[in-house]
Amino acid sequence: MKRILLPIAFAFFVTATFGQDIKKATSYVNDKNYPKAKTEIDGILAKDPNNTEALYLKSKVYAAMADSSAYKSLFTGDPYQEALEAFKKAIADSTNPKVTLLVVKDNYQPIFGIYSGYYGEAAAAFNDAANSPNKPDTVGFAKAMDLFIKANDVGQYIAAHKWANIGKVDTTLVLNIAKSALNAKKDDSARKYFEELADAHIKGQHNAENTADPNFELPYQWLTLDYKQAGDSANMVKYATIGKELYPNDDYFDFVEMDYYREKENRPALFKKYDELTARHPDSLRYHLNYATEIFSYVYNSEDGTVINDKDQLLSTLQAQLDKALSLEPNNPNVNLLYAQYYYNKGIVALEDAAKIKGTTLTADQKKNKADLTTQGTEFLNKAIPYAENASTTLEAGYKKSEKSRYKSTVNLLQNIYQSLGNKEKLKVYQDKYDQADTKFVQ
């Protein structure tokens, strides 16, 4: 009988001892005497690593102590991580009513303390890195990123158990991870978390239906530019499209796409974007002028041998954009100068085409065609004059040094026009203006 009763008696003695230790540890916890509570709990778990009540108390005490710098020296590792592991292990025993009661009574305090603790340390690390005299403090931002990720992992653990209403994407937290990664020069991580936000169409802290927080525009902007630089047009367009849906008043996404199409020499796609942009902003002088300038450069400044498809249609669009720009600001020197250049180029092209028709035995049709082209060229040159003069007159007002270059371009154009027209008197006038510009535009 002794061989049977001795182990039973011993087991009872051990259980009773642990019970007394748990009560003592609980008393220390209630009194917030965390160092003594830690000593008691560590002692219990050293003898019985699976004691669920002690594990739960450990999570509670370690989380509380981790939140105070006064206790940091008592830990060799990460107290939040140890608290998390203890908490998970404690609640894994769902049949233990004591632990269940403790968790409910504390309203899951330990796990929320771990979540907020990691978040607080991450925010502090981010701010320290941002204010560091050693810029960029990539090490500091990398530390912040790792801490934010740990907070996010805990948050998703909480969400999975439905202890709090934390979304599948913890909006601000995930944004902070991405921003930390970006500052830490960890683009792969930044891309991962920005995509997590963008793929969920997140536009604010609580993703309210009718409001879009500008702080959450960064993921869409960064991803659009990142994929543009990578030459990934599909993802570039994907995130630009989502960005425009959520932030319809920001033309950033259009400009990134336009740069991409320009670099790839995809003129149809580029001009289509301009059509969308000018339609969306009918009263924007800048967009109309930029569209006209883009067409002008393509038609007249392309390398020799470049095939210009739909040239007549493009020039018609150019003129329509200039007309709209002039209606918005009739005396804008940039618009007037471009309109003058437009007519000048048309005139020169017509005169050059006329000059190509030569020979001693021209047919009547050839002679007529030559004469028509010469007349047409002269008319275009004359149409350019008032626009160029308007620009030069406007730029002369004030003689601002910053306007000198444009002014000289304008009077140089007028020289070319009058030289082509054979008007020596006017040519001399603008030659003098050009020569005097350096002494007049000095303010």
Image (spheres, rainbow, N blue to C red):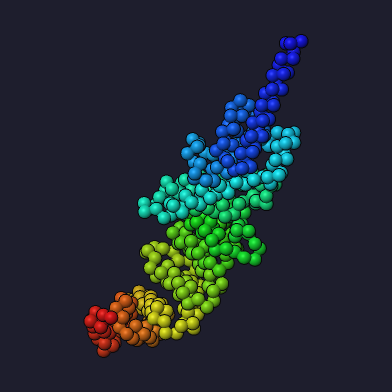
Where's residue 12, x and y in %? Answer: 71, 22
Q: Residue at (71%, 44%) from the top-left corner?
A: 105
Query: Which quadrant would the C terminus be assigned to in this image?
Result: bottom left
Where's residue 354, x and y in %? Answer: 37, 78
Q: Quadrant of residue 201?
A: bottom right
Query: Which quadrant would the N terminus be assigned to in this image?
Result: top right
Residues 372 and 10: in front is: 10
Visible residue check, residue 346: no
Q: Is residue 126 above or below residue 385?
A: above
Where's residue 430, x and y in %? Answer: 27, 84
Where's residue 429, x and y in %? Answer: 26, 87
Q: Is residue 280 above or below residue 36?
A: below
Q: Residue at (64%, 45%) from the top-left corner?
A: 109
Q: How many marks?
A: 0
Q: Is 148 positioned to the left or the right of 393 in the image?
A: right
Residues 204 and 323: in front is: 204
Q: Given the current orientation, which residue lies at the most extreme bottom position?
A: 425
Visible residue check, residue 35: yes
Q: Residue at (62%, 35%) from the top-left corner?
A: 25
Q: Is residue 243 above or below residue 231?
A: below
Residues 351 and 257: in front is: 257
Q: Is 175 positioned to the left or the right of 370 in the image?
A: right
Q: Is 375 positioned to the left or the right of 243 in the image?
A: left
Q: Residue at (64%, 34%) from the top-left corner?
A: 24
